[in-house]
Every structure is written in structure tokens, then in C-alpha cells.
Amino acid sequence: MRLAGKTAIVTGGASGFGAGIVRKFTAEGARVMIADLNEAGAKALAAELGALWCAVDVSNDESVNAMAGSALGRMGQIDILVNNAGISHLPAPLDEISEADFDRVFAVNVKSVYLTARHVVPHMKGRRKGAILNVASTAAVSPRPRLSWYNASKGWMVTATKSMAIELAPLGVRVNAILPVAGETPLLKTFMGEDTPEMRAKFLSTIPIGRFSTPEDMGNAAAFLCSDEASMITGAALGVDGGRTI
């Protein structure tokens, strides 16, 4: 129960790594708001776990503002913010990615961190406490070819994490990132281009531990970094990747 008494928002919390984080936070005693564009998925998981939920478009300022307001109104405070919502473009040469795909990746993976900071950080600064976790990717530090603009968006997230951490540390707010390798999530097929045994074997050959990241792996790492046990850790970008970035 390391998160007992704490409240958390998890964006993209209805599925994949986000759902793993929601499940772990709930098991550790936190009151969690699942914030997701997938309203049906968020509602179903919230009902299963006794959590809260709200529909949000993390790339839209008005929607993120409403999410923050709903969380404060229903939970009274925001102790933890997990920026997990993310997307990718299909693998392709960097000069062939459409402008629409580029804009969408940066709106969800980059602008969302800016928007949640606008609407949640003032509350944390006022209380002089809080923990923010950005779910980046091994792509930030060990990029794969043909995913160039996704790689770049996650690299931005790591730099943003460190920049936020150094500015907010004197105000009692910690900011960290986790870097998963590909996992059994809705994005796996997007990363690989096609989900075949051959493609899976190729991906797994780059992970020394020999398996994909799981939602449980992300939940375990997130719970530690967002707990008081990690009170001396800020600005870290923790690889939860089975050795992929060694």
C-alpha cells in the first residue's frame, strides 16, 4: 500500500501500459482517475477496479483543462500525474511520413505533456508536492529506423522530463520518465508494421532478457517512482527494457 492516500491521473489508462499502471496504483492504495479518449474502455476498467474515469483528448487544451478540473473536483487533490497516452506512425522512410501523421504524433506525444503541465502543475506547485511520470520509450535513446518522428517525439519527452525536474525540484515536485521497450499493447503492430512470428523474433532478438515489456513491468516501475520511496529521485529516465538500451 505504498500509494495509500494518494490520488493519480493516468492518461491513456484504459489499455496497454496505462492499464498496467492503473491496476498497480489501485492495488497500492491510490485513488485513480483513468483519462482516455477511449471512453468505453476507461469506463469498463474503472468499473472493474473501483476507479474514476473521464474522457479526454490529451492534444486539446480545453479537454485537458476539463480533465484536471474533474480530477480536482472529484478527488480533491492531484498527487500523481502519469503522462502515458501516446501513439506512433507506421514504419516508413522519414521523408515519406505524411504531415498529418507527423502532426498527430507530436500532438499526442509532445503537446499533451505541455498541456497537462499547464493545468496540473500549478496545483502541485501550490501544495509544494507532487510526482509526474512521463512514459517515454527506448526509442528516445536507441532509435529504430523507419520510426524517426516517433523516436524524436519520445526523445523530446526525456528532455522535457529533465527540464521539468530541474525547475520544479525546489517547489517539491518530482518528474521522472520510464522507457519501455515494445510490449503487448495496441501499439505493437504499429511499431513492427506487421505482426508476424518472423517480425516478433526480429524484435525480440534486440532485447537481451528475451521478452517484451509488459503492463505489469510498467506498473511496478511507475509505482516505485511515484511513491515516497523515490523521494530522492527526479529527472531520471529509467529503462524498463530488458537491456534493450545497453
Image (cartoon, rainbow, N blue to C red):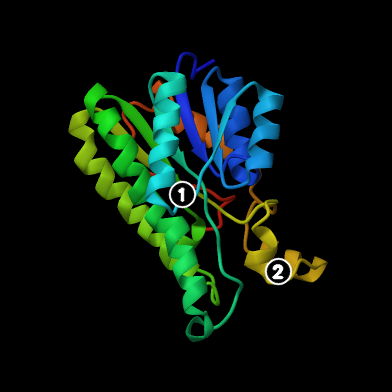
Q: Earlier in the sequence, mark 2 or mark 1?
A: 1
> What residue lies at 34% left-to-right and 35% top-to-bottom?
120
Q: Residues within 10 Å of mark 2 (few under 14, many from 20)?
A: few
Tell me, yes or no, if residue 141 can be seen here. Answer: no
Label ID, residue 46: none
The amino acid sitting under disc 1 is Val
For mark 1, what is the residue?
Answer: 58
Viewer-closest of 72 and 178: 72
* Quadrant of the drawing holding the N terminus: top right
> What residue lies at 56% left-to-right and 20% top-to-bottom?
28
Q: Is residue 178 left or right of residue 122?
A: right
Q: Nearer the viewer, mark 2 or mark 1?
A: 1
Above or below 35: residue 90 = below
Q: Position of residue 69 (x, y in %)?
A: 39, 31
Q: Position of residue 60 (x, y in %)?
A: 42, 52
The amino acid sitting under disc 2 is Lys
Q: Position of residue 212 (x, y in %)?
A: 67, 52
For mark 2, what is the residue?
Answer: 202
Q: Is residue 78 left or right of residue 169?
A: right
Rounded to the nearest whole Å, what is the CA distance between mark 2 and mark 1?
Answer: 33 Å
> What residue lies at 80% left-to-right and 68% top-to-bottom?
196
Q: Residues within 10 Å of mark 1 (few under 14, many from 20)?
A: many
Viewer-closest of 49 and 201: 49
Above or below 81: residue 185 = below
> What residue lies at 67% left-to-right and 59% top-to-bottom?
188
Q: Position of residue 241 (x, y in %)?
A: 56, 51
Question: Mark 1: which secondary structure?
Answer: loop
Question: Mark 2: which secondary structure?
Answer: helix
Tell me, yes or no, if residue 174 can be seen here. Answer: yes
